[in-house]
Image (cartoon, coloured by chain):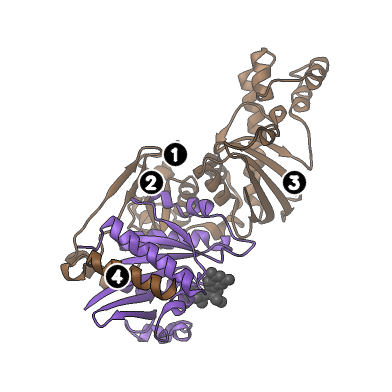
Chain colours: A purple, B brown
């Protein structure tokens, strides 16, 4: 069985759950309600605190999507999920400059946790408050990466757009040859 | 090309960091609508940048032209200053022009420039306001470039990031800035190999312990400083673009990954601004976790056909 594991991460409300839901063939295992209750979550060990989505290509090939929690208090999930993914999409809500610093912080964290290729997906790019991608790239410090991650606008509510984003990530995997034999 | 927003959601030091990192040119218009116990700060400011460096500050609400300021200090006679004001000067900063004509000294220009940026230092205490940055790209038409306020410029400049560094050092009132301090549980990671600004001793100590692992509170213990001071120094270094903050997660799994995965520590040095990047020890590098290119190509085809 060949499984491509892709992480979907970003700060709170960036569109991770929406992204996974838009493309998954199964109903996304939704942990949003659980995740709002810290105590309940702390009791559950490693099972529930992420959005799990799946796409079956055929009997031997599958794509798994893992949407991480955005809230820092669930950060142990990042540690569990991120080292396992082959690549990840880092979502940023372009209309919320108040979250950019937190995005950068999270990205710094992810960069240390995993060396897998990433791309940056800009959500809410249709908003009149949306920032331009060059400015977001600067604000997020993307030039500090060994390989500057590609940036793409993505409408997390639209399956075509989500697929384009995933295609770009898979192309990066091939190009960078990381996690690839 | 504009960026607009509110200082409440994108702070002034962040804005300067962006202008510095992007080596941006243009005019930053800042409207201060409330300044709590400093009502004199309220008003409209035009702050001009050239390639990431601040070149002049114009207080539109209490406007006094540079030439008037010079005249008021008795550095130019009213006769000369009127003649200058009425003549067509070349497109160079007024300060440089006067200096060329031996009408003003370097020292006087420095003084004038310091007076301009002192206003900017005060803006760090402003909690609410809105900003609009009109970028003038190098490719911009001459028309836009003509609007550069040569008559308000001393010819001196300072990197946008250095303004933050200076302002944060001078800061006495931390009420507004407190919420921007990195948490004491965060670590710092270096963004450059060597600081390109002169640091004060505390900043140096923090810089040297910025290893991507050690939380600020531990750094404080190491160097025998109150945590708050270390957080302040860290904020200065962050906004100066020298380091960045990073949360640390203490998980049981973290130690496990360290032990059973290759510990790659890649260092990348980009020639332009001597950026370094250290990366990560983890990736699903176990042989059985690696993917075949043919599989990845199938995924792409699948996504194209199903959602194209
Ligand atoms: N217009 C627009 N709305 C979007 C886009 N992406 C997400 N949304 C909306 O943004 C909201 C937040 O999205 P979520 O998917 O819940 O965000 P999340 O990242 O999972 O948030 P947390 O799990 O709390 O960290 C939802 O109402 C989405 O419908 C987009 O690209 N465009
Ligand atoms: Mg979610």
Marks 1 and 3, how far apart in space? 32 Å
Marks 4 and 1, how far apart in space? 53 Å
Marks 3 and 4, how far apart in space? 58 Å
Residue at the farthest top position? B102
User: Front-most of B20 and A134?
Assistant: A134
Element marked by disc 1: loop
Host chain of mark 4? B
| Mark 3 or 4, nearer chain start | 3
Label 2 sits on residue: B207
Element marked by disc 2: helix
| Mark 2 or 1, nearer chain start | 1
Query: Residue A144, can we see it?
Result: yes
* Image: B14 above or below A181: above
The percent position of residue B109, horizontal first and vertical second, equals 64, 24
Give the label on residue B44, or none.
Answer: 3
The percent position of residue B205, horizontal first and vertical second, equals 38, 45
Q: For label 1, count other residues whose C-alpha is less than 10 Å away and answer few (under 14), some (14-19) or many (20+).
A: some
Q: Are marks 2 and 1 in contact (CB under 8 Å)?
A: yes
Q: For label 3, count other residues whose C-alpha is less than 10 Å away and answer few (under 14), some (14-19) or many (20+).
A: many
Residue A35: image quadrant is: bottom left
Label 4 sits on residue: B298
The percent position of residue A65, horizontal first and vertical second, equals 36, 75
| Mark 4 or 1, nearer chain start | 1
Marks 2 and 1, how far apart in space? 9 Å
Give the label on residue B199, or none.
Answer: 1
| Mark 3 or 2, nearer chain start | 3
Q: Nearer the viewer, mark 3 or mark 2?
A: 3
Left or right placement of residue B177 versus residue A171 in this view: right
Q: Nearer the viewer, mark 4 or mark 1?
A: 4
């Amino acid at each position: 069985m060949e499984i491509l594991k892709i992480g979907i991460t970003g700060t709170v409300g960036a569109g991770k759950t929406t992204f996974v839901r838009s493309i998954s063939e199964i109903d996304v295992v939704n942990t949003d309600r659980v995740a709002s209750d810290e105590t309940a979550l702390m009791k559950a060990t490693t099972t529930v605190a992420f959005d799990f989505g799946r796409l079956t290509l055929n009997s031997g090939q599958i794509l798994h999507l893992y949407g991480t929690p955005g809230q820092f208090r669930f950060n142990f999930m990042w540690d569990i999920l991120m080292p396992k993914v082959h690549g990840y999409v880092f979502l940023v809500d372009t209309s919320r400059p108040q979250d950019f610093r937190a995005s950068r912080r999270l990205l710094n964290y992810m960069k240390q946790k995993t060396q897998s290729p990433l791309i940056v997906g800009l959500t809410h790019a249709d908003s009149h408050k949306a920032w331009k991608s060059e400015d977001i790239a600067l604000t997020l410090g993307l030039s500090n990466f060994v390989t500057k991650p590609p940036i793409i606008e993505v409408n997390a509510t639209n399956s075509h757009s989500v697929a384009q984003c995933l295609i770009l990530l898979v192309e990066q995997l091939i190009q960078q040859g990381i996690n690839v034999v | 090309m504009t960026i607009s927003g509110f200082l409440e959601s994108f702070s002034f030091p962040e804005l300067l960091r962006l202008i510095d990192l992007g080596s941006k040119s243009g005019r930053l218009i800042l409207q201060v609508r409330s300044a709590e116990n400093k009502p004199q700060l309220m008003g409209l400011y035009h702050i001009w940048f050239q390639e990431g460096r601040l070149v002049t500050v114009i207080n539109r609400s209490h406007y006094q032209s540079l030439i008037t300021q010079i005249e008021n200090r008795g550095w130019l006679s009213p006769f000369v200053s009127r003649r200058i004001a009425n003549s067509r000067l070349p497109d160079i900063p007024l300060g440089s022009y006067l200096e060329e004509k031996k009408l003003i000294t370097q020292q006087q220009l420095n003084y004038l420039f310091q007076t301009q940026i002192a206003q900017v230092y005060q803006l760090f205490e402003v909690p609410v306001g809105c900003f609009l940055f009109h970028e003038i790209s190098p490719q911009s038409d001459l028309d836009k470039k003509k609007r550069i306020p040569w008559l308000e410029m001393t010819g001196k400049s300072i990197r946008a990031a250095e303004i933050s560094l200076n302002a944060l050092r001078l800061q006495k009132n931390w009420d507004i800035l407190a919420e921007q301090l990195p948490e004491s549980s965060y670590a710092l990671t270096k963004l450059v190999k060597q600081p390109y600004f002169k640091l004060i001793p505390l900043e140096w100590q923090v810089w040297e312990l910025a290893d991507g692992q050690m939380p600020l509170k531990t750094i404080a213990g190491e160097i025998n400083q109150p945590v708050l001071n270390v957080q302040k120094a860290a904020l200065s270094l962050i906004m100066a673009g020298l380091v960045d903050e990073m949360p640390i997660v203490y998980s049981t799994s973290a130690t496990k990954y360290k032990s059973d995965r290759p510990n790659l520590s890649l260092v990348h040095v980009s020639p332009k601004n001597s950026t370094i990047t250290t990366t990560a020890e983890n990736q699903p590098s176990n042989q059985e976790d690696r993917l075949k290119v043919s599989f990845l190509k199938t995924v792409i085809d699948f996504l194209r056909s199903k959602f194209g």
